[in-house]
Image (spheres, grey):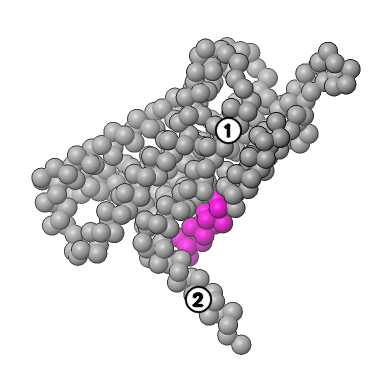
């Protein structure tokens, strides 16, 4: 329907604009400021790269979800969905890595940090991306242009970009995606942040936390950082949850799903790429300060004769 196409084009245009510009700003700010070269910020940099990658592939999603015929070729059919899957999976894995670091820093502050060296941290991020991509390899193999013949003389055939494997294999892979990309990481995040919350709000945790802080400002910054991290997890869970739950029901019940409904659920999930940089701007004080500093320096350079 025309209304469906219009809604998708308008909303995706907003999501792409905010997602691309916002995540580019985050990447530039964190990578250019030595003050921000810390474990959590480096993982946030990786998360911003994931969001940027997904935002850059959204034009393909718009055309694919609003066109009756697929006309973008077999190459993009095999490339874009795996790239999008890699971006989504690396995002949730970065959130898990951040939660592990926060859990150790807050609950076990005397233990050695799991990312105690830059080399370890870079290896961890590389493994996140490699594992996320490797899990998409089956899609590269089975995705292709498929021609569906119809019984109408006006439109004798329709071309679609879809997976071409047996129903049982498709069902098994879909369930694995839902469990590994969404279910297990979300359970880990709930467990880790649940333990962090219990420790912080327990009497012993509050006393230890207060004695460890040097000033009211640093305590306030740490609280905002932890709130931001929880909101990043919550937004991912809430925005992608409907899509993954619907996919699970569709696979398990082997029922027909409306393309328009799938398109809307994907749209809701993709809002996450635009929301993340807004959360950084609102709650990460150091990122906001460095961004303002870079903008002022840029304008000073332009105004100088």
Q: Of residues 281 and 128, which is closer to you in this image?
A: 281
- The residue stretch that appears in magenta: 18-34
Marking on residue 73: none
Report the predominant secondary structure element of the magenta stretch: helix
Q: Which residue in the rendered view is the most extreme toward the front? A: 3
Give the x, y percent position of residue 37.
39, 60
Q: Quadrant of residue 185?
A: top left
Q: In the displayed structure, would residue 190 be above or below residue 257? A: below
Taking 130 as reference, is 69 left or right?
right
Q: Of residues 135 and 288, which is closer to you in this image?
A: 288
Taking 302 as reference, is 161 left or right?
right
Q: In the displayed structure, would residue 303 be above or below residue 137? A: below
State which quarter of the image contains the N terminus: top right
Disc 1 and disc 2: Cα gap in Å? 41 Å
Q: Which type of secondary structure does the marked residue at label 2 adopt?
A: helix
Taking 57 as reference, is 148 left or right?
right
Marking on residue 297: 2
Give the x, y percent position of residue 271.
52, 43
For the point 17% across and 52% down, which residue is it?
A: 209
Instruction: Say if the magenta span includes residue 109.
Output: no
Give the x, y percent position of residue 62.
67, 39
């Amino acid at each position: 329907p025309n209304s469906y196409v219009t809604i998708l084009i308008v909303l995706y245009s907003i999501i792409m604009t905010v997602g691309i510009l916002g995540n580019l700003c985050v990447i530039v700010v964190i990578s250019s400021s030595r003050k921000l070269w810390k474990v959590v910020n480096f993982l946030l940099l990786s998360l911003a790269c994931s969001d940027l990658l997904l935002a850059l592939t959204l034009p393909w999603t718009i055309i694919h979800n609003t066109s009756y015929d697929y006309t973008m070729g077999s190459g993009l059919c095999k490339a874009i969905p795996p790239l999008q899957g890699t971006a989504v999976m690396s995002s949730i894995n970065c959130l898990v890595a951040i939660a592990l670091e926060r859990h150790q820093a807050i609950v076990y502050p005397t233990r050695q940090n799991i990312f105690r060296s830059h080399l370890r941290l870079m290896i961890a991020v590389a493994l996140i991306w490699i594992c996320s991509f490797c899990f998409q390899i089956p899609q590269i193999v089975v995705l292709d242009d498929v021609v569906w013949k119809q019984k109408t003389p006006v439109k004798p055939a329709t071309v679609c970009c879809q997976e071409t494997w047996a129903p049982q294999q498709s069902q098994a892979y879909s369930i694995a995606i839902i469990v590994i990309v969404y279910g297990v990481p979300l359970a880990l995040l709930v467990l880790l942040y649940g333990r962090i919350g219990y420790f912080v709000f327990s009497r012993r945790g509050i006393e230890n936390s207060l004695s460890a802080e040097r000033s009211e400002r640093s305590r306030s910054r740490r609280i905002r950082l932890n709130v931001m991290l929880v909101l990043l997890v919550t937004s991912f869970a809430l925005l992608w949850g409907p899509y993954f739950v619907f996919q699970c029901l569709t696979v398990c019940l082997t029922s027909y799903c409306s393309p328009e409904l799938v398109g809307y659920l994907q749209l809701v999930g993709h809002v996450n790429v635009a929301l993340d940089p807004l959360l950084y701007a609102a709650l990460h004080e150091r990122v906001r300060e460095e961004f303002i500093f870079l903008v002022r320096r840029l304008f000073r350079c332009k105004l100088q004769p």
